[in-house]
Image (cartoon, rainbow, N blue to C red):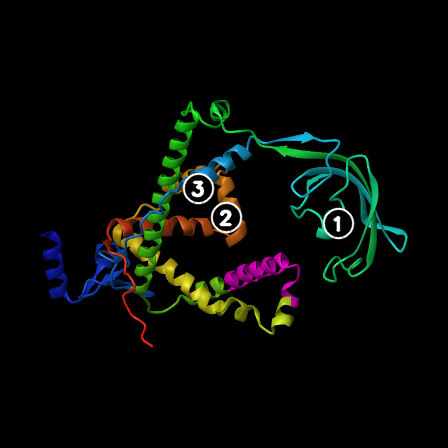
Amino acid sequence: MKKRIMALFLAMAMVVVATACGRDYKVGDKGEVYNDFVKIKKWKELEVERVDPTPVTDEDVNMSIESDLQTLATWVETKEKAAENGDQVTIDYVGKIDGVEFEGGKDSNQTFILGQGKFLEDFQKGIVGHKAGEEFDVAFKFPENYNEAVAGKDVVFTMTLHKVEEEVIPELNDETVAKMSDKAKTVDEYKAQVKADLEKSNKESAEAQMKANAFAAFIEKCKVIEYPKERLEETIESCTEMYTEQLEQMAMMYGTTLEELKKSTGKTEEELLGASFEDIAKQQLLSELAVELIQKVEKLDFSDKAYEKFLEEQAELFGYEDGDAVEEAYEEMYGEDSFKLAFKQEKVAEFLYEHCKVVEPKTTDSSETVTE
């Protein structure tokens, strides 16, 4: 009843200036809210398609248990077994180019797992098949895009293989269950616990997706009136810096540099991203402006106390030591104050989800027939 009275009042009132009540936004004749920068047409009763949790299969349970058993794995030294990928080895090595040692090409007692990428692939391949106590040479050519001082040059590494260790993963039994669980006492109890935990996780993931979808639907109902000039310039600058750095990291994953990637593809940074830095910045700033406006309209709790609680929850969820650690890690990737923005968006997304209208997911019509 209160909602109907309010809707009628808004229809009659044309535009209500909310600053008269100490608020810096206005309400339009159709219930939209706006300030100097952004207008929001609708934020409650947004339609969000239901996302069903992914069913948990026996394979999912087994894979999770294998991962848990992996945490109890030990390394057992073997004298007779030849090294292969997945084994842990300890070596000394000396590298020479044209018979001369080079800087950075010598080390001792290096322990690593074969095949995990700590050293160049050709370097590791040369160790496979050798046993502890052997001394041998491994010859190959450095990649062209490697360290400039040695790139493209032939090298010979003289290696001494001190130790080969094989990973031993314990069997699943009541004894190992006691090490992995505080609740389960038997294998069957542990499997049931793992399944329940996975089902809970899948349910939370489905809800998180619906929250994200609610926020996306909300942004579609938002319209920019005018971007605050100085703030837009700052956002463009930060987006340019952040996404350029991410492109550089992506290029490194493929063994090249951003400049080489641009040269080989003939594309600019923005073409590689598929959007201009300005467009990305405007979308980000729209989200920020909309979040700030809805927070004022609905009086959402963005207090320091609420933020500290959010930090603690995220630290526990992602396995960080404390809130400061998760905040620092996030801001290293996305920039200063980015985690505070994530907190605000999460709070708004939660509110939108609580007040949304969950509808049946759209289904594609598979009944069409193919005629020759």
Marks 3 and 2, the one that precedes in the sequence: 3
Name the residue beneath numbered marker 1. Answer: 123
**Distance from Cα at disc 3 to Cα at disc 1:** 36 Å
Res 321 seen here = no
Closer to us: 42 or 185: 185
What predominant SS class does the magenta segment belong to? Answer: helix
27 sits left or right of 265 in the view? left
Name the residue beneath numbered marker 2. Answer: 330
Marks 1 and 2, the one that precedes in the sequence: 1
Name the residue beneath numbered marker 3. Answer: 59
Q: Residue at x 67, y 39 (%)?
A: 87
Provide residue 88's location: percent of width, then percent of height: 68, 37
* Cβ atoms at labels 1 and 2 below 8 Å apart: no
Q: Residues within 10 Å of mark 1 (few under 14, many from 20)?
A: some
Q: On the image, which quarter does residue 161 sit in? A: top right
Q: Secondary structure at mark 1?
A: helix
Q: Is residue 343 above or below residue 226?
A: above
- Kindly identify the amino acid type of the residue bearing the numbered disc 3: Glu
Q: Residues within 10 Å of mark 3 (few under 14, many from 20)?
A: few
State the count of labels. Answer: 3
Closer to us: 123 or 262: 123
- Kindly identify the amino acid type of the residue bearing the numbered disc 2: Tyr
Q: Is residue 186 above or below residue 80?
A: above
Q: Is residue 305 above or below residue 45?
A: above
Q: On the image, which quarter does residue 285 sit in? A: bottom left
- Kindly identify the amino acid type of the residue bearing the numbered disc 1: Phe
Marks 3 and 1, the one that precedes in the sequence: 3
Q: Residue at x 73, y 44 (%)?
A: 128
Q: On the image, which quarter does residue 14 sit in? A: bottom left
Q: Residues within 10 Å of mark 2 (few under 14, many from 20)?
A: some
Q: Residue at x 43, y 49 (%)?
A: 340
